[in-house]
Image (cartoon, rainbow, N blue to C red):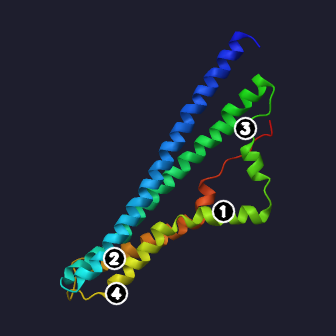
């Protein structure tokens, strides 16, 4: 192998390492969004106790689904970028390295795509279940809103309620359709 090929391989490997670090950073962001959702769910649960003394707390239960939806959308954005990076590694860098090294390397995507239907179904369900962190607390929050005593009318209550319902539906749709957004294409087997 000539020195130009070795330098090209080193450049591809450096790019690969940089992209893997970017994937890790974005996965950490997803964990952070999940942690925010759990902390906010704890705050909402605590707000139930305060709602007996202060009926104005009910507004928190209307605003919470919007917050969870924003976190869910940020989570999806990170998932899309992670898969795009993986797609670039698989379909951009991998073919060059296979050609340069004459070795069929980095076959994870092919291995994953060859799994049987049941394994794929289970993995897909587990992957989409991560969205429950954003959908379930929104539904719980809206349920709390109906349970707590509130002022006769909260300003903009109808609008906030409709927005809350819409963002819950949006998050639910995103949870079900995530697999259409985040998929690595297998262009070739080389």
What's the CA distance linking mark 2 and mark 1? 30 Å
Is 82 placed above or below 55 here? above
Given residues 91 and 45, the one toward you in this image is 45
What's the CA distance linking mark 1 and mark 3? 22 Å
Quadrant in which residue 32 is drawn: bottom left
**Residue placed under numbered mark 1 in the picture:** 124
The tag on residue 146 is: 4
Residue 160 seen by the camera: no
Q: SS class of the residue under badge 1?
A: helix
Q: SS class of the residue under badge 3?
A: loop
Q: Earlier in the sequence, mark 2 or mark 1?
A: 2
Q: Earlier in the sequence, mark 1 or mark 4?
A: 1
Callout 1 touching callout 3 (CB < 8 Å): no
What's the CA distance linking mark 2 and mark 4? 14 Å
Task: Say which quadrant the N terminus sits in.
Answer: top right
- Which numbered disc, 1 or 4, marks the residue closer to the eye? 1
The tag on residue 106 is: 3
Query: Picture coordinates of residue 7 (x, y %)?
Result: 65, 16
Q: Residue at x 67, y 31 (%)?
A: 93
Q: Residue at x 60, y 47 (%)?
A: 83
């Amino acid at each position: 192998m000539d020195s130009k090929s070795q330098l090209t391989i080193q450049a591809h490997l450096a790019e690969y390492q940089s992209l893997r670090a970017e994937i890790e950073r974005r996965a950490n962001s997803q964990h952070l969004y999940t942690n925010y959702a759990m902390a906010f769910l704890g705050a909402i649960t605590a707000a139930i106790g305060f709602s007996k003394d202060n009926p104005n707390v009910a507004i928190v239960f209307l605003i919470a689904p919007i917050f969870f939806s924003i976190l869910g959308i940020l989570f999806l954005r990170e998932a899309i970028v992670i898969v795009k990076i993986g797609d670039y590694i698989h379909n951009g860098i991998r073919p060059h390295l296979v050609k340069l090294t004459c070795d069929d390397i980095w076959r994870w995507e092919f291995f994953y795509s060859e799994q049987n239907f049941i394994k794929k179904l289970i993995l897909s369900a587990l992957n989409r279940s991560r969205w429950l962190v954003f959908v379930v607390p929104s539904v719980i929050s809206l349920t709390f809103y109906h349970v707590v005593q509130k002022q006769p009318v909260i300003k903009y209550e109808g609008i906030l309620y409709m927005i809350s319902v819409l963002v819950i539906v949006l998050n639910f749709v995103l949870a079900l359709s995530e697999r259409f957004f985040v998929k690595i294409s297998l262009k070739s087997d080389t």
